[in-house]
Image (cartoon, helix red, strand yellow):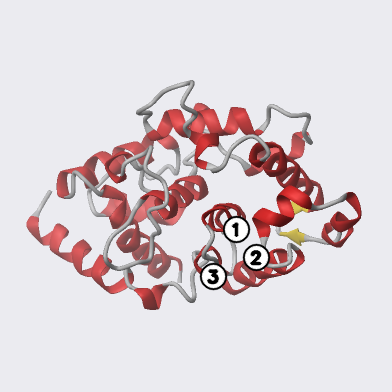
Amino acid sequence: MTDALKEMLDEKVAFYNRPQFIEADPICIPHSFSKIQDKEISGLFAATLAWGNRTTIINNCRKLMQWMDNAPHDFILHHCDTDLKRFLSFVHRTFNATDLLYFIDFLQWHYQQHPSLQDAFVPESVYTHPTTEEALVHFQQYFFLREHPHRTQKHVATPAKNSACKRLSMYLRWMVRHDDAGVDMGLWKKISPAQLICPLDVHVARVSFRLGLTQDTKANWKTATALTHSLREMNPTDPSVYDFALFSLGAEERF
């Protein structure tokens, strides 16, 4: 890893990892709440819907939060069936009301038993210090323990199928990372920032290949872990901080 590459990526991180970044990014949704469970729930929806136009993503997330009376944890726990009628018209790309209602059902079931959504990724009974891969595999399996629409499976990725898991990796970055910049929230402690896998989509995969950080342009779990291994050479304790740099370079490639 060259010093010049690290210097360039560090400069990009410094530019994008700052409070001004929040307003135009889906992470603004969980940042609009103070209660931890509200941040967890709104963050999961924001990450799940985070593909396509950013303004549309943010607007649709805000609509969902308004329909949950801007108190998602309380709504999830205490809503009744008639409260769900307002969600029947919801659609964001291929995520529709069927998917949304199952997400709500799962979240209610989970929060009736656990104080935090972190327990859906890292249950104490399974392992104490999991890898991110183990956490994501467990979450997907746990998420679909209940009777569910088959179509909804495409909205919750898993490394077990070699998916890059870009949106869930981003969600974990939001929940786990923390620094003085204040963009990522650092709410969860059972996974460390050093364990995180850098979020990877097709644009980041191509940029990473051109920079010599990977040997493949495929956006899958294998490439995501290879990229993260390279990033750990530059920052062993916080490799996913370079998501700020690589995402911005990927966006520049896209446009």
Q: Which residue is mark 1?
A: 42
Q: Of callouts 3 and 2, which one flags the residue occurring earlier in the amino acid sequence?
A: 3
Question: Which-is-in-front pick, marks 3 and 2?
Answer: 3
From the viewer's perspective, tell me whether residue 57 is left or right of residue 200: right
- Distance from the alpha carbon under mark 2 to that under mark 1: 8 Å
Q: Type of residue at label 2?
A: Cys
Mark 1–mark 3 CB contact (< 8 Å): yes
Measuring 70% from the left and 58% from the top, which residue is drawn there?
Answer: 93
**Label 1: which secondary element:** helix
Q: Tell me the amino acid under the disc marked 1.
A: Ser
**Point 32% across, 72% down: residue:** 18
Question: In the rendered structure, which disc, 1 or 3, sits on the residue that comes first in sequence?
Answer: 3
x and y percentages locating residue 134 in the rendered image: 44, 28
- State the separation of the CA atoms marked 1 and 3: 9 Å
Q: Relative to residue 127, is residue 205 depicted above or below?
A: below
Residue 141 occupies which quadrant of the picture? top right
